[in-house]
Image (cartoon, rainbow, N blue to C red):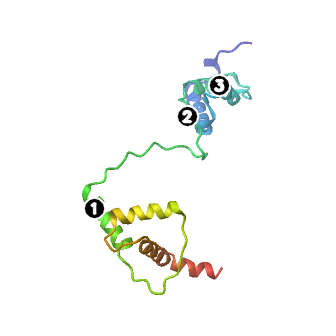
Amino acid sequence: MARTKDAVLAPEQKELMEKEYLDFVKPSTYGNKANPSSCNSLYDGVENPELRAIVEKVAATTPYREETSTNEAQSPPNPQKRISGKQRKATLEEYQQTFLQVPRIDDRKPVFVSSDVRDRLDRVVRILGGRRMSVSGIIENIVRHHLSLYEEDFEAWRKL
């Protein structure tokens, strides 16, 4: 006894099945251009011919997406927000107040950083810092800021 697809499932049932299937399928598991047969694995185990047709249709019409390092569904990219010159200047001033003030360092001790980090810090100091600012000064300011920012956490972690 042969039955047509339309006689077996009502259009509402088909739509519901398509929606349920789309909610179930991860976007990165179908339409893989590197392995075109990978989309077949989605419906190889489907015995219901109506459902198999729906799955094939969804796999064929869904745009290709590259796999990402995370298995989460991708959200649409956020549009790039424009930052005004005023905001940039304010953030620069805040940065300079926090990290590029010449610190008073008593009882100096040597600290070692890689040459790459040293070169990058030196460039920042030359471009944004004042005449008396040095790499040692910016390191001192960064470490002071870090220690004050995490002071409460250090105390809590010490008690663990």
Farthest-out residue, top: 1
Percent position of residue 128, x then y: 33, 64
Q: Confirm or deny contact between disc 3 and disc 1 (CB under 8 A).
A: no
Q: Earlier in the sequence, mark 3 or mark 2?
A: 3
- Which of the pair 144/71 is nearer the observer? 144
Of helix, strand and loop, which one carries label 3? helix
Q: Quadrant of the image for the C terminus? A: bottom right
**Dividing the image into 4 quarters, which one contains the N terminus?**
top right
Q: Which mark is residue 89?
A: 1
> Label 3 is placed on what type of residue?
Pro
Q: Residue at 63%, 18% (x, y): give it.
A: 5
Which is more foreground, mark 3 or mark 1? 1
Does residue 125 appear left or right of residue 66 in this picture?
left
How far apart in space, not on screen, are marks 3 and 2 (Cα)? 13 Å
Q: Which is nearer the eye, 19 or 145?
A: 145
Amino acid type for the residue under numbered disc 2? Arg
Q: Amino acid at mark 1?
A: Lys
Q: Nearer the viewer, residue 2 or 87?
A: 87
Where is residue 117? Give x, y as percent.
50, 62
For disc 3, the marked residue is: 36
In the image, farthest residue toward the left = 86
Q: Earlier in the sequence, mark 3 or mark 1?
A: 3
Q: Could you say which is closer to the camera, residue 66 or residue 62?
A: 66
Secondary structure, mark 1, is helix
